Image (cartoon, rainbow, N blue to C red):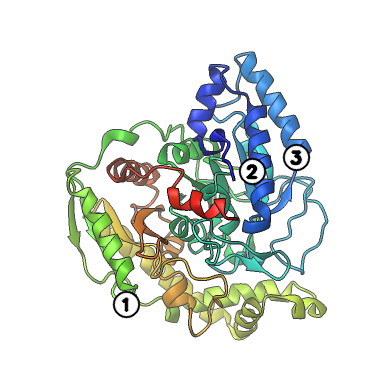
Amino acid sequence: MSDHPVTWFSASELTTLYARKALSPVEVVTAMLERAGKLQPSLNALVLIDSQGAQAAAKASELRWQQGRPLSPLDGVPTTIKDTTPVKGWPTRNGSHATDETPATENAPVVDRFLAAGMVIIGKSTTPEFGWKALTDSLLQGTTRNPWNVAHSPGGSSGGASALTAAGINPFNHGNDGGGSIRIPAAHTALVGLKPSYGRVAQYPADAPFADVVSQGVLARSVFDTALSLNVLAGPDARDWRSLPADPRDYTIGLDDGVRGWRIGLSLDFGYVKADPEVRELVAEAARRFEPLGAHVEDVGPLIEPLQKDFEPLWIGSFATRLRQIPTQLHAKLDPGFRAAAEKGLVITLADYARAYEAKSRLARDLALWHQKFDLLLAPVTPTAPPTVETLYNSDAFPRWTKGAPYTLPCNLTGQPAASMPAGLTRSGLPVGIQLIGPPRADHTVLRAMRAYESALGWRWPQPKVLETLSKV
């Protein structure tokens, strides 16, 4: 398969060319739609493609650039929206037979922000049922595959977004993260994935079971594009009382200020997680890249108690809340793993929930105090490289608490910003991610560390192995 060059351009490169009138949003969107159509049968990363609407939006953007009146530095950049998120006029299926084709009556805040910036939404990306797991497959929409190796998962629950971005379809694609759902697929596809601070990006509708752990963001190929996207997305919305107050900060300013003098902690196991030796080796090597940049990196030992005892009530209790909303006659059509976890959660009591929230507060306090001495915490994103698509999530072979999301979930519970950056490839050529965790609400600190690491790493897209894989599909 031949690659149209613009499909690998960053968002900032695209709009620089738009401004020079050397490239048109119509050309770019046409190329992205063409590439998405060619790769969809192999990757299964999209649940909806709106060619007509995307082309109309691209023409409107082209006119704005011709008149020198773009709506933002991202005007005319194409993207997609994860199918847990409402787009007015489109159904929100959540990867589930328990939903239907009823069109959404309003946009989520992230959609409004993208549209206000002049971005072009070409469709919706795949997710597992109700975003419940760190793999992306569902009985409704099938299995999404990893562009690095189609026998493997791109992670989840923003797996469609990660597969698209890694395959050269849009500079970045929307995702959200309630337990690692941006960072895990970013790690499994060698992308840049920032989970912003909780509340930094407004969320609506507020999914009651998980309303206080989910952050909205994107999966991108560069840190600068990630900062540009946060400039557009950050800010309050009257529909989300949890959203943080408006902040006029430009997240691209100070990106290149470096990490000299920073004190950085490294924890390869948090005290209890048993990562694969190859993952530990790659993350430890990646962490050492901060030392030539002038930072002091030290192993900080155990940090976090095992999560399952304190926090399983929140997880399965929230799934039970969702299950109670689904008509009984549809239960047989649910993902068996989701249904099993939800049914187990039916016995969770209010006292169980209260104890879990007390533990959540303690964890947030303890990590905030830890960050008074350290600017940044480094850890793996996942204990394993991307699992195969046949993997059963939360099974004995792949339990959630030790294999699925043990490294990522803590930052959802505390609300602090955290990101995945490429740590390298295993000997079998599969990506591994290093997690960069910042103090509460210090998104700019995490972005600055991400940019310093990116410069030292020298990671470039398109990756030869991805091109090789996609040339065969």
Q: Which residue is mark 3?
A: 51
Residue at point 46% right, 57% down? 183
Question: Which residue type does callout 3 highlight?
Answer: Ser
Secondary structure under badge 2? helix
Q: Nearer the viewer, residue 251 or 124?
A: 124
Cα separation, mark 1 vs mark 2, equals 43 Å
Q: Is residue 350 above or below residue 114?
A: below
Q: Which residue is mark 2?
A: 35
Q: Is residue 381 above or below residue 352?
A: above
Position of residue 251 measured from the top left corner of the image (x, y, whole percent): 42, 35
Tell me: 46 left or right of 217. right
Residue at point 40% right, 70% down? 384
Tags 3 and 2 in contact by the CB under 8 Å rule? no
Position of residue 107 measured from the top left corner of the image (x, y, whole percent): 71, 45
Tags 1 and 3 in contact by the CB under 8 Å rule? no
User: Which numbered tag is attached to residue 416?
Assistant: none
Other residues around mark 1 within 10 Å, as few (<14) / some (14–19) / many (≥20) = some
Tell me the quarter of the picture where residue 403 sits: bottom left
Frontmost of labels 1 and 3 is: 3
Q: Earlier in the sequence, mark 3 or mark 2?
A: 2
Residue at point 49% right, 85% down? 396
Q: Earlier in the sequence, mark 1 or mark 2?
A: 2
Tell me: 168 left or right of 283. right
Frontmost of labels 1 and 2 is: 2
User: Which numbered tag is attached to residue 272?
Assistant: 1
Tell me: 361 left or right of 61. left
Secondary structure under badge 1? loop
Cα separation, mark 1 vs mark 3, equals 48 Å
Frontmost of labels 3 and 2 is: 2
